[in-house]
Image: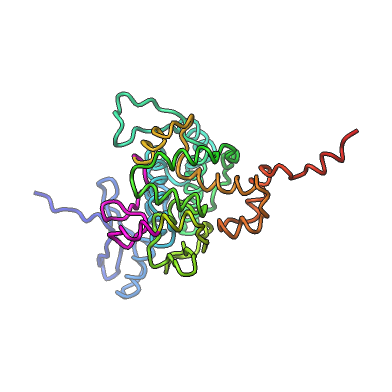
């Protein structure tokens, strides 16, 4: 039986001089380190390995994605979403080299990118459809960041210049107050009722509400602190919001029945991954003509406040949203906005 051949390059002494030996396609290769000094030979070996790793054929886009995702662990809050986007990219482009990810390759990916059946969906009956512009934009950002990381690591001479997909139009549809009352009236599960009360009463994001613990709900001052201790500050900021009378009553009732430290709980456990099936059944019982998502609630609250003419700075402080975003997206819902200007154009 032939001896197993080492896959990695190694040092070997030949005629008093160190050399690097490796196998390429079954053929034994050798290159001289040009020295008899073992320390200098080990340095030569490390340089040889680093150069080999940076050869284009040795760096696939899948490997670059793995390095990027692993490098972002502990540095981004939505690491699972980043990994999900990387999985979709790896499935279609992973076998290519990093230098083969061009505008043409991305355009082909964007054209052919469709949805896949979920775990609870029968693959035989699933009808693929184009993914949303937001999903495509998120995957493009991961692709571009991965290529920039590959460039910094020496796998690319320069990152390619890629044209990003178009942004989706701002969301115009939002829940009316009547639809919000219908959702509250249709609530059967206590954890969904508490979630809705917090969402409609503060305009906080779903993740901030599900992560809220009782030690950050102060009934004495009537304030709710959605910022988690030790959580890095990100672009999606979290506010300290006051509770109105209706929300206070709901929270006091929930506090008496609480079995855990989380405000939104189910069977004594936190609800970390959303309200998928509870939310779907709730929308069906409420008889809504469309199916919103929990993310529509923050958008709805900001739209209601704009309709009521609440100043932008106050809406920004309550919902912890960038005032520039509010002026760009929500000011159009204010019926008084630009009305004097329009009247000035009367002939």
Quadrant of the image containing the C terminus = top right
Residues 58 and 243: in front is 243
Residue 282 as seen in the image, left or right of residue 304: left
> What colouring method underlies this structural image?
rainbow
Q: Residue at x 8, y 49 (%)?
A: 1
Q: Residue at x 47, y 56 (%)?
A: 149
**Residue extending farthest left:** 1
| Residue 297 place in picture, x, y as percent | 50, 45
Q: Is residue 243 above or below residue 293?
A: below
Residues 333 and 5: in front is 333
Q: Is residue 95 above or below residue 325?
A: above
Q: Residue at x 44, y 48 (%)?
A: 196
Q: Is residue 220 above or below residue 153?
A: below
Q: Quadrant of residue 254?
A: bottom left
Residues 181 and 265: in front is 181
| Residue 294 place in picture, x, y as percent | 45, 44
Report how many numbered discs are placed on residues in the image.
0
Q: Is residue 196 above or below residue 119?
A: below
* Residue 253 among magenta residues: yes
Residues 18 and 240: in front is 240
* Residue 39 among magenta residues: no
Q: Is residue 95 visible?
A: no
Q: Residue at x 54, y 52 (%)?
A: 158
Q: Quadrant of residue 228?
A: bottom left
Q: Is residue 67 visible?
A: yes
| Residue 118 place in picture, x, y as percent | 33, 35
Residue 311 as seen in the image, left or right of residue 225: right
Residue 187 as seen in the image, left or right of residue 182: left
Range covered by the magenta-colored residues: 252-277
| Residue 203 place in picture, x, y as percent | 52, 52
């Amino acid at each position: 039986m032939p001896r197993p051949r080492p896959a990695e390059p190694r040092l070997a002494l030949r005629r008093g001089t160190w050399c690097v030996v490796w196998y390429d396609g079954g053929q034994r290769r050798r290159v001289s380190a040009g020295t008899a000094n073992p320390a200098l030979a080990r340095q030569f070996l490390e340089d040889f390995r680093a150069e080999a790793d940076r050869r284009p054929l040795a760096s696939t886009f899948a490997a670059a994605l793995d390095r990027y995702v692993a490098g972002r662990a502990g540095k981004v809050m939505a690491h699972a979403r980043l990994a999900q986007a990387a999985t979709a990219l790896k499935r279609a482009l992973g076998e290519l080299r990093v230098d083969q990810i061009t505008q043409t390759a991305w355009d082909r990916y964007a054209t052919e990118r469709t949805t896949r059946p979920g775990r609870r969906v029968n693959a035989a009956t699933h009808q693929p459809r184009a993914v949303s512009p937001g999903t495509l934009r998120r995957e493009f950002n991961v692709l571009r960041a991965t290529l920039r990381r590959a460039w910094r690591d020496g796998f690319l001479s320069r990152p390619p210049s890629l044209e990003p997909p178009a942004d989706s139009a701002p969301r115009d549809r939002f829940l009316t107050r009547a639809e919000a009352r219908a959702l509250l009236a249709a609530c059967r599960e206590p954890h969904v009722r508490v979630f809705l009360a917090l969402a409609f009463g503060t305009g906080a994001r779903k993740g901030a509400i599900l992560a809220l613990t009782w030690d950050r709900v102060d009934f004495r001052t009537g304030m709710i602190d959605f910022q988690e201790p030790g959580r890095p500050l990100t672009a999606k900021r979290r506010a300290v919001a006051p509770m109105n009378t209706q929300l206070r009553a709901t929270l006091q009732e929930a506090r008496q029945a609480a079995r855990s430290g989380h405000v939104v709980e189910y069977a004594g456990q936190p609800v970390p991954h959303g309200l998928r099936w509870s939310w779907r059944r709730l929308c069906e019982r409420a008889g809504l003509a469309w199916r919103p998502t929990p993310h529509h609630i923050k958008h709805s609250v900001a739209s209601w406040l704009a309709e009521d003419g609440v100043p932008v700075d106050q809406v920004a402080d309550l919902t912890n949203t960038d005032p520039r975003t509010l002026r760009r997206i929500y000011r159009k819902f204010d019926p008084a906005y630009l009305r004097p200007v329009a009247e000035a154009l009367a002939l």
